Image (cartoon, rainbow, N blue to C red):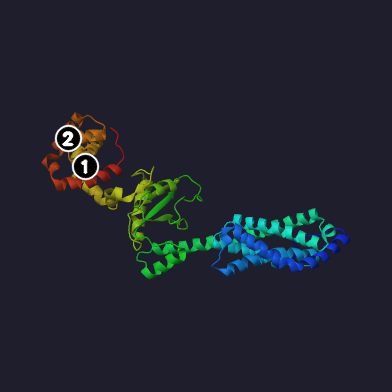
Amino acid sequence: MSRLVDFSGLAAEQRRRLADAADELRPYVPAIAGEAAESIRREIPQYGRPHDPRYGQAVSKAVEELIGHFIDLMGERDVSSDEVLAYFRELGAGEAREGRSLDVWQASVRIGAGIAIGRLTEQAEKLGLGGNVSEVGYIAREVFAYTDRIAEVVGEGHAEAQARAEGEREGRRRRLIDLLLTDEPDAGELREAAGRAGWALPQTVAAVALALSGRDPAHRPALPPDALVGLHLEEPCVIMPDPEGPGRRHQLETGLDGWVAAVGPAVGTDRVARSLRWARRALGLATEGVIGDDKLIVATEHMPLLVMTGERDLVALVADRRLAPLRKVRPALRRVLAETLLALIECRFNATVVATRLSLHAQTVRYRLRKLEDLFGPVLHEPAVQLELHMVLRAWLAMTPDEAE
């Protein structure tokens, strides 16, 4: 049996007078509790709900429990605090469910304790108990120790409820992620799962594939609350709503610090698995060193590589045929000419623009263009050939290491 207040420090005669005082003061508890509750509702807006009388009654009951049990402890040696502890632990859980912090509760306790001490002392004096009853300093210390212990219990209930709610929310979000990542999720089931998880179904989402970059595996992305973080998966990912909205890319870039991350294309909520496949393909290329991983990788910005590297045998075969003229020059010049040809195709053979892009003199670019025209012949300017060259050059340059002389 637990007991929140222990008056064993008082002499037997003092304890007897305390018990007598408790009997005299007990009838005044409801009025004092009502006054304290009214003051709490007036001074703390979160507790004032004039449209809901039941809520006011609940506040009054909590204050009456707080004061009444202290009076009981004054009067009876063998009274247990177990039920009161359970009551206030559940009250703390209720505060968490209402979304209030413990600061609000602690403020209300200070108000209630202050009024209770003042009014009980006044009543004791009116009843002629003053000098004998209130060895005031001793009892006041017990009041504050009592309210401190009650506050601890409320805090425990609050923390337990928050942890439980967070665990339930995390579980519902995990189930939602798993459903979103199925190939063709049922629309009704998806709406229901999103509702349970408290996640508003967006118009578009993008999947982000993740890999750790030298960080503790427990390192969690710092993303907005509407981002679904799937660290429970064998291959972790994030599902980002409205990925093309204002500031969203910046949120991903800053929030995924410490991760190598590749974001897939924006899709509807029924196609998240497809977005993730492209994101994982892009992440794989970054892991291989084919594309850089120093910033957020956007899969759609590497579309030619993603497409071409999906069929590497075909790329090698086409490169052998279409880039055969480059084998006529030494290895170091071969790569230089390939990079220049790619830039020429992408800049519509404008030597000035290519020179700026490659940090070269325009005359150098023109010299290389003549060399390429000698190697490839007139087909170099045929649109269909340029399209094929553009794709194969992007893939070949990414997948082929620099060659020595």
Give the amino acid at mark 2. Leu
Mark 2 secondary-structure assignment: helix
- Mark 2 to mark 1 CA distance (whole Å): 14 Å
Question: At 22% across and 41% down in the image, what residue appears?
Answer: 342
Image location (x, y in percent) of residue 348: 18, 41
Check disc 1 and report the residue beneath it. 346
Residue 179 found in image quarter: bottom left
Give the amino acid at mark 1. Glu
Image location (x, y in percent) of residue 372: 17, 36
Quadrant, the N terminus: bottom right
Vertical placement of residue 366 versus 282, above or below = above
Marker disc for residue 369: 2
Q: Decide if residue 53 is on the left or right side of residue 400.
A: right
Whether residue 65 can be seen here: no
Question: At 12% across and 39% down in the image, what residue appears?
Answer: 377
Mark 1 is surrounded, within 10 Å at the Cα level, by few (under 14), some (14 to 19) or many (20 or more) other residues, namely: some
